Image: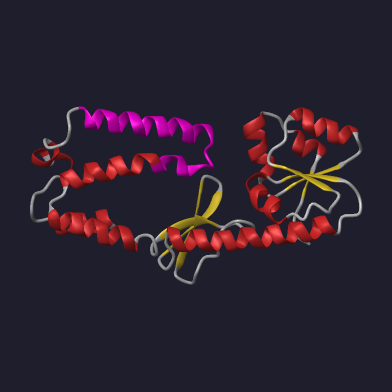
Amino acid sequence: LFFGIFKVSKLNSGFDFWQGKTQESALPKGFLLALIIIFIMQLMVFIRLPFKAEFFIPAIPFILIYFGKLFNQNDARLFAVTAVLSCFLFGFDYKNDFRGSPPTGASISFEAGGKDLYFDMLQGPAIIDHRKRLVKSKLVDDVIFWMLNQDKPAYLIAGWYWPEVELKDEKSSLVKTDYYATEQEIIEEHYNGVEIFYLPEINEANAKINAHYLADSLGKPWTPK
């Protein structure tokens, strides 16, 4: 949003965003190198756990400082206003019945990387995140209800749902929950005759983290009835 407005407003001024030499010269010596190193470090962590985009958050203050040195006062104000607006408008998310934010009527759907995504003009990251949490909480409530009514031992790999499951679990069920499961943990539960379940998409995440596919072969997906 900001860069679109910024580009249009500067069409006739001849300003080159990447050559703001006067403002850039005011940066501390070595700042750009430090910024690049910080970004690369965060990128390496993100590659290790690609579903943890929040690992990029530590780099944001340094990027904002760089922008602040490049912009004049009017551009900085425009950046601040559009940054706030972008929290509530023009957001992206992927369609997912279990942890995605439902799109509004002002959304445009498309496919990328084998996933169904959408661009929504009426939802930004703040709104999308709130609605995603409501969807995830609804799934956790269904899980808790199932756990309390389970009449035989079971082992549930909960993944990113695990913290909320643990918070709401009354510890009175026959279901043992785990964040992610190692190969040995799954084999032990299977050997003891315990039924193994995993929540939506957690089998894929577990395979990435623990480098095995026993959740798929010895367990089965749990979905709301």
Location of residue 69 with respect to 1 vertically, above or below? above
Quarter of the image containing the C terminus?
bottom right
The residue lying toward the viewer, choosing from 173 and 179, is 173
Q: How is the image coloured?
A: secondary structure
In the rendered structure, the answer to whether residue 76 lies left or right of residue 84 reads: left
The image position of residue 191, as x and y in percent, is 89, 32
The residue lying toward the viewer, choosing from 154 and 92, is 154
- Whether residue 97 appears in this view of the structure is no
Location of residue 61 with respect to 120 vertically, above or below? above
The residue lying toward the viewer, choosing from 107 and 38, is 38
The image position of residue 114, as x and y in percent, is 56, 46
Residue at figure coordinates x 8%, y 53% from the top left: 13
Quadrant in the picture for residue 141: bottom right
In the rendered structure, the answer to whether residue 216 lies left or right of residue 31 reads: right
Q: How many marks?
A: 0
Residue 138 shown in magenta: no
The magenta segment: 30-57
Residue at figure coordinates x 63%, y 33% from the top left: 209
Residue at figure coordinates x 17%, y 55% from the top left: 75
The image position of residue 146, as x and y in percent, is 81, 58
